Image (tube, rainbow, N blue to C red):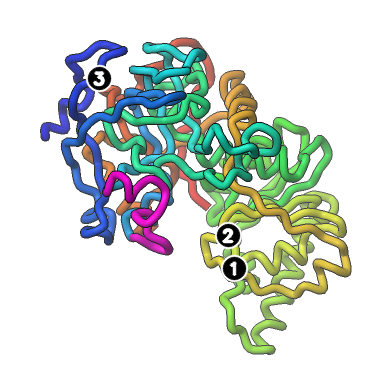
Amino acid sequence: MDLQQVSSLDVEPGELPKTMAAWVIREERLGEPKDAFQIEEMEVPEPGAFEVIVRVMAAGVNYNNVWAALGKPVSVMKYGDHPEYGHHIGGSDASGVVWKVGPGVTRWKAGDEVVVHCNQASYEDPEVHGLDPMAAPSQRIWGYETTWGSFAQFTKVQAQQLLPKPHALTWEEAASYGLVYFTAYRMLLTRCGLQAGDRVLIWGAAGGLGVFATQLCKATGAHCVGVVSSTEKGELVKRLGAADFIDRSEFAGMMRRGGESPEEEKARFRTSREFSNRVKEILGDAPDIVFEHVGQATFPTSVYTVKPFGKVVICAGTTGFHLDFDVRYLWMKQKEIVGSHFANAYECMKANELIESGQIRPVIWRTMGFDGVAQAHQLMLENKHLGKISILVGAESEGLGRTADGPGAIHAEVGG
């Protein structure tokens, strides 16, 4: 297929073409992204009840589809709706144009400009109507646990996934933030009740999650310190609102590898205590909240560092899922460990309003063409990327889609 023509269509909103270009993963070629992702001509799906077909203008790249390509730690091909279709089109962030709506959709119409959040759940699950869609047994992440993601000319979503596209953002900027930002919003605002005056420690403050956690602290009136991997990233974090930063290389000995000898564990704990004291110096006291997503390497330090009755909120384990820590610092100081996973539609809406108002800004590193999907994920696998990557799909070039003046995104090299 001619990938230079993905921005061209011969149909108007309301009418779907028969086929589309899509980057597809199939079970027989699971492996490194450069091999697993291949361009195919696919049939365009029709919208069902309460579903919408969106023409993708730009898509955001996340690590979840590195996992999808590898088939590790769990192959996506075995669950979600993949067995029904036999393939996987990844992509859990998108900006685009509503192209066709299914029966029952009344809030959106063809031509509306939108961003897509990635939580799906069945309308029939009672948890959706009285508890939280994130508790529904049908809950799954679109573009990872579902087939029709954003690395294609068209994607199929539930109508409740749509949010108005922020007017001051370009297509690529609007596609860059949803998964990580909405996750950070739920972690801090909903799960921890972040409020003015709170003290917060943010691991990986210059990473995809951390840049939004930092900005949310500033917008709320909380005080935060960010852990980063370089002075340059630290200066960005301060620009985003952190009181200061800590270069993690200064405290490398605090990182938990697992299987330490008693002597090694004593040395590790001494460094963690030094780190904790540094956090207190910056914030004026121990943190009320520790923003966790690193997992095995940092979790013992997080539990030790957070203040009595404080909360360690965690949404991932990028260095390992199996956590080993001294639980005495948890029960004797009555601390809490809080799990968090993405966000519901209401949280996504409220978070998106802060983007529209300019109080929170996306942070983006690079925009690539549609032919760069496999390369972008390979860069992630090899840790050669320096921040969030967007992919142009329907947008002909960077800089398009902005319909109002505003600050737009911050373009910077970030990550950790």
Mark nearer the N terminus (3 vs 2): 3
Along the horizontal axis of the image, is 8 left or right of 269? left
**Label 1 Cα crowd, 10 Å radius (few <14 / some 14-19 / many 20+):** many
Magenta stretch contains residue 85: yes
Q: Are marks 3 and 2 in contact (CB under 8 Å)?
A: no
Helix, strand, or loop for circle 2? loop
| Disc 1/disc 3 C-alpha distance (Å) | 48 Å
Q: What residue is pinned by disc 2?
A: 294
**Label 3 Cα crowd, 10 Å radius (few <14 / some 14-19 / many 20+):** some
Q: What residue appears at the point 80 percent right and 56 percent down from the top-left corner?
A: 280
Q: Nearer the viewer, mark 3 or mark 2?
A: 3
**Label 2 Cα crowd, 10 Å radius (few <14 / some 14-19 / many 20+):** some
Instruction: Tell me which amino acid carries mark 3.
Output: Leu
Residue 244 vs 57, above or below: the answer is below
The answer to which image quadrant residue 331 occupies is bottom right
The count of marks equals: 3
Q: Nearer the viewer, mark 1 or mark 3?
A: 3
Q: What residue is pinned by disc 3?
A: 16
Start-end of magenta stretch? 71-86
Q: What residue is pinned by disc 1?
A: 297
Q: Are marks 1 and 3 in contact (CB under 8 Å)?
A: no
Magenta stretch contains residue 183: no
Mark nearer the N terminus (1 vs 3): 3
Give the percent coordinates (x, y) of residue 253: 62, 74
Residue nearer the viewer, 125 or 267: 125
Q: Are marks 2 and 1 in contact (CB under 8 Å)?
A: yes
Instruction: Tell me which amino acid carries mark 1.
Output: Ala
Give the percent coordinates (x, y) of residue 81: 38, 45
Q: What residue appears at the point 48 percent right and 10 percent down from the top-left corner?
A: 404
